[in-house]
Amino acid sequence: MAGKREKIYPESKIELSPFVARHYDFLLDLVTLGGYARFIRKAMADLGIKPEDSILDLGCGTGRNAELMMKYLGPTGKITGLDLLPEMQEQFQKRFKDRARASFQQQRIDVPFDLGEKYDLAFMSFVLHGFPQPTRMIILENARRHLKPGGRLTILDYAEFPLEEKSKLFRWVFRTFECKYALDFIEYDWKAILRQLDFQVEEEKYYFKRSIRLLKSRLPD
Ligand SMILES: C[S@@+](CC[C@H](N)C(=O)[O-])C[C@H]1O[C@@H](n2cnc3c(N)ncnc32)[C@H](O)[C@@H]1O
């Protein structure tokens, strides 16, 4: 495959090139000197997965998170991963031989879709910040449509923070390597947005000096 592909959102950086997609986990560990591996293990432990959960992972990537989530699931628990890219499908399916417990669907999450199934937990990790705001609302609606009554939506992504209060280095890294959409993502009041969508905000956990947040919410029963 050629090194470049047409992007749906040219200014987004979460639509990865084939090279980055193929080596995504390795590159993340490399640039964070292994710090990401420790962080993501902790974040997945903090998710509060129940053994019987059915989980929809929107923008699931390589299945690395799904593999960590799987440790907390019992024999009836299962994960469905959705992602745009064939490179992610290949890596996800290599990880999981038992397709009944962890399946992958090549699916755009930024347009309305219906899988014809409802889940206990919809999860998104480092996905939402990479889209324009109207598209983020479509993605949240997609997540809500796929939840059972009382179902949970958990978002792992940047927290809200004033960029000017961060260190010079952080500001430089964020402005240089993140997409422009992330700059406005950190300014929205996500708890208020979730409440407008009928979710009850239940818990937030912060990492990396309150730059990253696990935001847990739930639909009414
Ligand atoms: C930054 S990566 C995060 C992957 C994974 N959630 C993780 O935490 O490791 C963003 C993911 O979103 C996927 N993605 C980007 N645009 C998408 C779209 N429109 N529909 C579905 N997936 C998309 C990318 O292919 C990529 O796997």
Image (tube, helix red, strand yellow):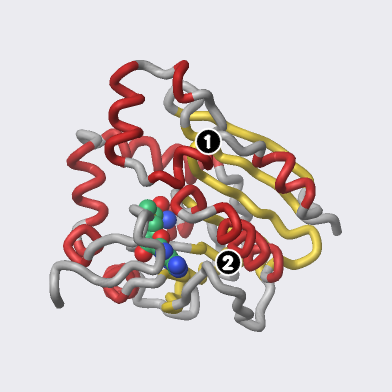
Three-letter code for the amino acid on which mark 2 is drawn: Gly
Distance, label 2 to label 1, CA atoms, is 33 Å
Q: Helix, strand, or loop for circle 2?
A: loop
Q: Helix, strand, or loop for circle 1?
A: loop
Front residue of 37/126: it is: 126
Residue 173 image point, x, y percent:
29, 31
Image quadrant containing the C terminus:
bottom right
Image quadrant containing the N terminus:
bottom left
User: Ligand 1 shows up in which quadrant of the image?
Assistant: bottom left
Circle 2: is it few (<14), some (14-19), or many (20+) Cα within 10 Å? Answer: some
Q: What's the residue at 35%, 33% (across, down)?
A: 174
Q: Which residue is mark 1?
A: 186
| Residue 195 sits above or below residue 61 on the image | above
Instruction: Kindly report which numbered mark, 2 or 1, lies closer to the viewer in this rendering.
Output: 1
Q: Quadrant of residue 33?
A: top left
Pointers 2 and 1 in contact (C-beta within 8 Å): no
Three-letter code for the amino acid on which mark 1 is drawn: Ile
